[in-house]
């Protein structure tokens, strides 16, 4: 849907969603602040699509929103953003993979399902120490195994 207003007038909303933080921040702002329910819904819709980035659109959006930035500076900035995004994605994948390995190792030991252990790990990952006691487990061995699992989970 083509925008008919604002600093991104003429842009397609799906292209704006691919335009990195500049485009996506505009869409987030619009989804909460536009008076038109039609446009707010459209902004929400494109924000719900799988995230894709397009370097050319990212540079164009940056130039359109920042009048004092030239093409070379915008391109350098965007390439830095794309490198950071790729590094973050690789780190998230490593965390997910190592977490799934731990879950598949410890679920059978704890006589638990992978889903239950995954839920507990995500729910308690930041403050699990002291939140559990041996009385909550079927045996002291299971409590110790859970503590071992959570310690490894934290240290991934």
Image (cartoon, rainbow, N blue to C red):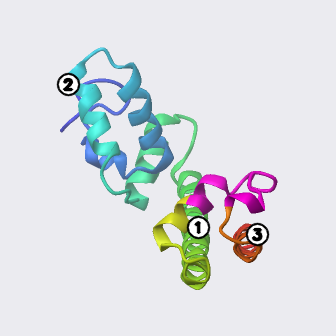
Give residue 154's position: percent from left, percent from top.
74, 67
Residue 59 position, x and y percent, is 46, 52
Residue at the disc numbered 1: 83
Q: Which residue is mark 3?
A: 147
Query: Sequence-wise, which precedes: disc 1 or disc 3?
Result: 1
Residue 4 % position (x, y): 22, 26
Left or right of 57? Residue 124 is: right
Q: Which of pointers 1 and 2 lies earlier in the amino acid sequence?
A: 2
- Left or right, 38 with respect to 9, comes to left
Where residue 133 is drawn, which disc sits there?
none
Judge from the rendering whether residue 4 lies leftward or rightward of residue 52; answer left or right.
left
Which residue occupies 24% across, 20% down? Answer: 37
Query: Which mark's residue is nearer the viewer, 1 or 2?
Result: 2
* Nearer to us: label 1 or label 3: 3
The residue at 29%/27% (across/down) is 40
**How many numbered badges does the structure rendering display?**
3
The quarter of the image holding the N terminus is top left
Asked if labels 2 and 3 touch by Cβ distance under 8 angstroms, the answer is no
Which x, y percent locates residue 94? Answer: 59, 76
The span shown in magenta is 120-136
Mark 3 and mark 2: span between their CA atoms?
50 Å
Name the element at disc 2.
Answer: helix
List the residue tagged with mark 2: 38
Marks 1 and 2 sit apart, C-alpha to C-alpha, by 35 Å
Q: Taking the image as drawn, is residue 65 in sight? A: yes
Q: Is residue 66 above or below residue 104?
A: above
SS of the residue under disc 3: helix
Quarter of the image where one finds residue 45: top left
10 Å crowding of disc 1: few (<14), some (14-19), many (20+): few
């Amino acid at each position: 849907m083509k925008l008919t207003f604002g600093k991104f007038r003429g842009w397609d909303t799906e292209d704006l969603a691919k335009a990195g933080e500049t485009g996506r921040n505009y869409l987030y702002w619009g989804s909460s602040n536009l008076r038109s329910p039609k446009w707010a819904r459209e902004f929400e819709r494109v924000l719900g699509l799988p995230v894709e980035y397009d370097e050319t659109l990212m540079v164009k959006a940056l130039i359109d929103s920042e009048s004092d930035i030239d093409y070379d500076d915008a391109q350098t900035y965007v390439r830095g953003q794309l490198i950071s995004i790729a590094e973050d994605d690789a780190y998230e994948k490593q965390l997910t993979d190592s977490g799934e390995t731990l879950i598949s190792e410890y679920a059978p030991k704890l006589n638990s399902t992978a889903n239950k252990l995954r839920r507990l790990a995500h729910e308690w990952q930041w403050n699990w120490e002291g939140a559990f006691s041996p009385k909550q487990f079927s045996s002291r061995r299971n409590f110790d195994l859970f503590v071992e699992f959570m310690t490894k989970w934290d240290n991934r």
